[in-house]
Image (spheres, rainbow, N blue to C red):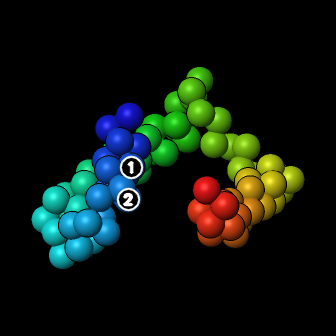
Amino acid sequence: MIGVGCLQVMLDKGNELDWFGSDCIVTLGIIALLTLSVLVVRELTAKHPMIDLTLFTQRNFSVCALALILLAWVAKPALRRAF
C-alpha cells in the first residue's frame, strides 16, 4: 500500500512541484519503485500469492490488459473535455 500511495501522490503533485526537480517527488518515486519491486518479487516467489502475476504469462490476459491501458490512455483527453 505504501508503494501505491507514494506513486499516486507523486503523479498527483508532480506537475505542481516541478516533477523530478523536487526532492519530494524524487523521494516518492524512489519509495514507490522500491516497494513495488519488492511486491512483485514477493508475489512471484510466494507459495500462495495474493496477486497472481503469473496470469500475465497467458497471452489473452496480457493482450486484454494492454488494450485496457491503451483505451484509458486514448479516452482520457476526450473524457476531460466532456466534463
Residue, x 64% and y 35% (percent of image)? 52
Amino acid type for the residue under numbered disc 2:
Leu
Q: Nearer the viewer, residue 15 or 49?
A: 15
Residue 51 versus residue 83 in the image, above or below: above
Q: Secondary structure at mark 2?
A: helix
Task: Work out which quarter of the rendered image holds the C terminus and state it.
Answer: bottom right
In the rendered structure, the answer to whether residue 33 lies left or right of residue 63 reads: left
Q: Image quarter for residue 20?
A: bottom left
In the rendered structure, the answer to whether residue 14 lies left or right of residue 47 reads: left
Q: Is residue 16 visible?
A: yes
Q: Position of residue 82 (x, y in %)?
A: 66, 61
Residue 72, label in figure: none
Q: Residue furthest top?
A: 48
Whether residues under marks 1 and 2 lie with C-beta atoms below 8 angstroms apart, the answer is yes
Crowdedness near tag 2: few (<14), some (14–19) or many (≥20) residues, C-alpha within 10 Å? some
Inter-mark Cα distance, 1 to 2: 5 Å
Say which residue label 1 marks: 8
Task: Work out which quarter of the rendered image holds the N terminus and state it.
Answer: top left
Residue, x 81% and y 54% (percent of image)? 64
Residue 4 versus residue 7 in the image, above or below: above
Residue, x 55% and y 41% (percent of image)? 44
Q: Position of residue 60 (x, y in %)?
A: 86, 53
Say which residue label 2 marks: 11
Amino acid type for the residue under numbered disc 1:
Gln
Residue 40 versus residue 74 in the image, above or below: above
Q: Position of residue 16 (x, y in %)?
A: 26, 66
Q: Position of residue 71 (x, y in %)?
A: 74, 62
Q: Secondary structure at mark 1?
A: helix
